[in-house]
Amino acid sequence: MSEKFMHVGKFIVKQENRDEFISVIKDYESTVEQKGLDHSHLIEAENEANMFWYVTIWSSRADWDTVEQLDDHKKLHEKCDPLLAQPANQNFGTIIV
C-alpha cells in the first residue's frame, strides 16, 4: 500500500508579478495532466505580502517524482522563476491523518 504524499512549494513573488504568477499556476493546473495528483491548492498568505504556498497531495511519492520530471513541469518553473523575488523553497511529507 502506498502512502499519500504532500509537496509544498513556497513562493515569494515580486509584487508586480502577483497576477501573472497566479495565472501561470492556474494555466498549469487546467492544462497539464498530473497522474497521481489527488488535489492541490494555491494559497496566498494573509500576513506576509506576496507569499504563496502551492500545496499538492499525491497518491504516492513515486507519482510526484514522475510528474516532476515531465517537460510541462519543468516549463512551469521556467515561467514562474522570473516572477519570484527569491528562489522557491519546497518541502515534502507523508500524510499521516
Image (spheres, helix red, strand yellow):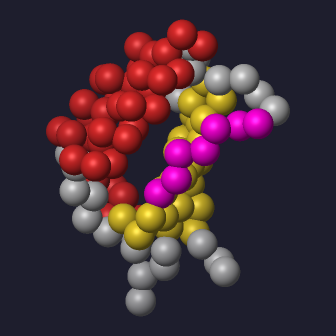
Residue 11 is inside the magenta segment: no
Left or right: 51, with 57 as reference point: right
Up the image or down, 12 lies above or below 70; here it is: above
Along the line of sight, the residue nearer the viewer: 6 or 19: 19
The answer to whether residue 68 is seen in the rendering is no
Up the image or down, 58 lies above or below 66; here it is: below
Image quarter of residue 15: top right
Most extreme residue toward the right, as rendered? 47
Residue at image location 42% in from the left, 22% down from the top: 20
Image quarter of residue 62: bottom left
Residue at image location 64% in from the left, 38% down from the top: 44
The rendered magenta stretch, by its main secondary structure, is classed as strand
Residue 96 picture location, percent across and down:
65, 78
Left or right: 18, with 77 as reference point: right
- Image quadrant holding the C terminus, namely bottom right
Up the image or down, 1 lies above or below 85; here it is: below
Residue 55 picture location, percent across and down:
54, 52
- Image quadrant holding the N terminus, namely bottom left
Most extreme residue toward the bottom, as rendered? 1
Residue 73 picture location, percent across and down:
28, 41
